[in-house]
Image (cartoon, helix red, strand yellow):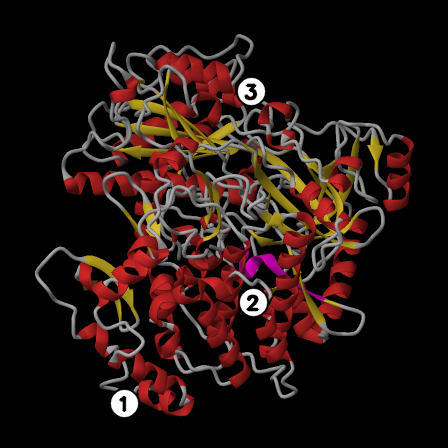
Amino acid sequence: MSSSEANSSNIAVETKLPKLPPPPFQDSPVTKNESSKNNLQPQDAQSRYMRLGDELRDWCVGPMPVSQFLDAFLPDQPRGMPSPVKAFKDVPSAPTDGKEVHEPLVKAFNYASKKASRCPGVRFVNTSNLPEHPSKFGSPKICAYESSSLGLVERDDTKIPAHFGYMLLFVEVKANHDFFLDPPEGADPKEHPFILDHIGDENTLKKAKRALGQNVAYAIDICKRQHRSFCFSISVSGSRIRFLRWDRAGVIVSRSFDCHTQPKLLCQFLWRFGRATDVQRGFDTTIFPTSEAQEMLFKSVVTAHVKKELELDGDKLEEAVSRHYQAERVLRVKVYADEHTHRDFLISRPIILPESMASRGTRGYWAVDAKTGKIAFLKDVWRTAVFGMNREGSIIRYLKGKKVRNIPEVLFHGDVPDSDVGDEVTADNDVEMQDIVEEDPDNADDKNDTPGTPNEDEAKGEWDGWEGDVSRATDAQCTRTQEYLHATWACIPEDREMKVTPHVHYRLALKEVGYGLEEFNGTHELLLCTQDAYFAILDAKRLADTLHRDISMNNIILVRCADGRRRGILIDWELSCKTSNDGKARDHWRSGTWAFMSVKALGRSFDFRHSIQDDLESIIYVVFYGGLRYLPHNTSMLLSDFMNNFFNQRDKLPDDGTVMGGVGKAANKNSRYYSRFVVFKTASLQKWLDGAFDLLDFESEEQWEDIDSLGKLWALALSDENLPTADRVVHEIPRNIVTEALDDATTISTRVPSAQVAETNHVQSRRKRKAADLHISGRDGPNSKRMKASAAIDKQPGRRAEQIRPSGPSKGATFRNTRATTRLRKRSETHVVAVPNVSRAVLPPSEIPARVRTHCMRTRSLKQSPNDTPVQ
């Protein structure tokens, strides 16, 4: 490539660039039928940017002195850097439009002297109008690529677009506004508004927040499309520069500097980055290419397992296999037990990808053991690394030792090292590795981590919490944002609760491989497999004093047994915990996937501790969600608003950013505000849900204490010999609602400070609350006209369906809840409440039952996707 081409920003050349094999850790396959840039779709991109900009406040640390930033994250390099004098003289100081900056900046970045380039081996490209796909919305203004990868990125018209699969870093350019404001010399950082708060104009603030959220979305996509432990970006406002480092704990932002007066700082960053290793640039180097024979092995094993699970042939089988396999993109990944022992697995297309930045970043793969040729499930996750949180593999092995039913079997698990530690020992198969364990049973440091029987600590259940201590994971890939949370330069108000949580990269291989619960075939399978999960919940509590704390659609998988039926396996035990003598969780962590969390878990009480009733309430919502999405009923026309209000409702208080939710669920517990409008075609399912919601009723607290009561409903429903086995229908709803309900990104896990627990440990007596409720609602007593009418409708399912089914186009847009619509307006202080006939209805305080208000006020949360989810 000529020097003129090297200095150009994005000029088409006559000959196409060579296409070399891609690095194994770049351009990772995305899930089947998912856009590679679904975060950037125009229909929901703007609102998503606003949400991401809001969330960033909770996990952003800065401003770090620039010299400290460089020394901490990019090691110094040998001499030879081109002179920084007037390196950026053509970059305007006060541009009227960001476009005026793009070309001069790209030219300066790509400068090469006779001896060296400013950023060796890296090519910067102006991609401001070149998204990866023409139909997609939004792209970084400037992207950096490995010079050898340009041929892989080049389009047919020889232009270089913004390709997140190969991007080394991105540069976002704004003309005249900065998202951040550095404190002046001598100011107290703890009292300084650093992020967005310095912007007074409301319209300007909205634009800045949206632009900041756009940066978050770009970082998410880089870490989703590549195997990364972190990534860098550069923020440009006129001639002022900031460096950013993103990882799964948050983002560290440098102080701002002017590239005209301090060009050496920017030149040092480029020089060090260009000469940095792959690990120093943030790549996970424990991913390797495969041979043609290994790719054929992977495809044949996956094809056989899909055929067994789904009983398909021909084109349908090939289509199903493509969900897990992408040609020429099969990779070999190492799962480490320690620095000397690992197991190789083959992977290709994931079934789960992370949709958030500061989170567990879960990826899930169908995998093949490279030695034994057996199918497995590989979970690649950034586990929460705080004292008391054990590794999931250790937890599952402990539960297995306690004979808990319907949980997976661990093959191999361990933290991922900073770089590949070599091939000292390869675990060939379960038998050999079991022999290794038996030969060295007293190895206290190897808690794990080898196939075969659980080690001594796991079998006894002696969890001392060391596995969660990030300081013990010295050789593993760890986040670093948390290291600077209490730095003297960090602008973090003392009264602000930051959500910067340390994470450690971790892999877990499981024996059971199946499909998510959302792919059940009919009513019988939905009830049967959720019953299996129910048994796992009960066993874990009774046999192992353990609570799961994240019951969701994604965490129950369907696996075909020898008898031909599929059974439910309860997975994702990472957020589980031991219980105290009172049967509740030992700690005050709130955890779960938002859409399926209990009303109490979403409530405001700071003394909340998870109980088995919260897990059982979650599994009721799982059955309800599955029925609404995939079984025949009468509400398909209104399903989007209905499900959004019931499962996803949340509001963020403007004063302290507290997230509150669960209003729809609490209203349903109080008066069947939602479920009464749903009539399922299958009577046994209807009876199960009616009985389950009766148990959840605020008036049934004593009966709900009997954890076997829910099991009786399953036994009764499954005794119906006419229960449909193939009545699945798919009710289409917008993708954003599905993502809200199922994404790992919305899985939350928040520890409530003990001081707050002691401070807020005041609860009204049950009798007083009941009296207050009846007094405030005025007509919710058992003899009220409203309750009598409801009871009459409930006894006549056919009539209820006729009564609430829309009669014609003019009246069919919504279900009419006359009790709500007759009291929508009152000029007084109001509260927002979700109701079935409108997406939001404004009700005066007296219309909200006291128990609904009590349980639906506040929850302080750490977002991790509901696919989200997980917030896994």
**Circles 1 and 2: CB distance less than 8 Å?**
no
Does 554 lie within the magenta span? yes
> Please, what is the three-letter code of the amino acid marked with disc 2?
Glu
Q: Secondary structure at mark 3?
A: helix
For discs 1 and 3, the disc positioned in front in the rendered view = 1
Q: Residues within 10 Å of mark 2 (few under 14, many from 20)?
A: some
Q: Position of residue 119 (x, y in %)?
A: 48, 22
Does 188 lie within the magenta span? no
- 674 to the left or right of 144: left
- 419 to the left or right of 259: right
The quadrant holding residue 322 is: bottom right
Magenta residues span 551-559
Q: Position of residue 754 (x, y in %)?
A: 43, 33
Q: Earlier in the sequence, mark 1 or mark 2?
A: 2
> Please, what is the three-letter code of the amino acid marked with disc 3?
Arg
Separation of marks 1 and 3 at Cα, in angstroms: 69 Å
The quadrant holding residue 861 is: top left
Residue 160 in view, yes or no: no
Q: Secondary structure at mark 1?
A: loop
The residue indicated by pointer 1 is 808
The residue indicated by pointer 2 is 518
Q: Earlier in the sequence, mark 1 or mark 3?
A: 3
Q: Residues within 10 Å of mark 3 (few under 14, many from 20)?
A: some
Q: Secondary structure at mark 2?
A: helix
Residue 275: which disc?
3
Q: Residue at x 43, y 45 (%)?
A: 608
> Please, what is the three-letter code of the amino acid marked with disc 1?
Gly
For discs 3 and 2, the disc positioned in front in the rendered view = 2
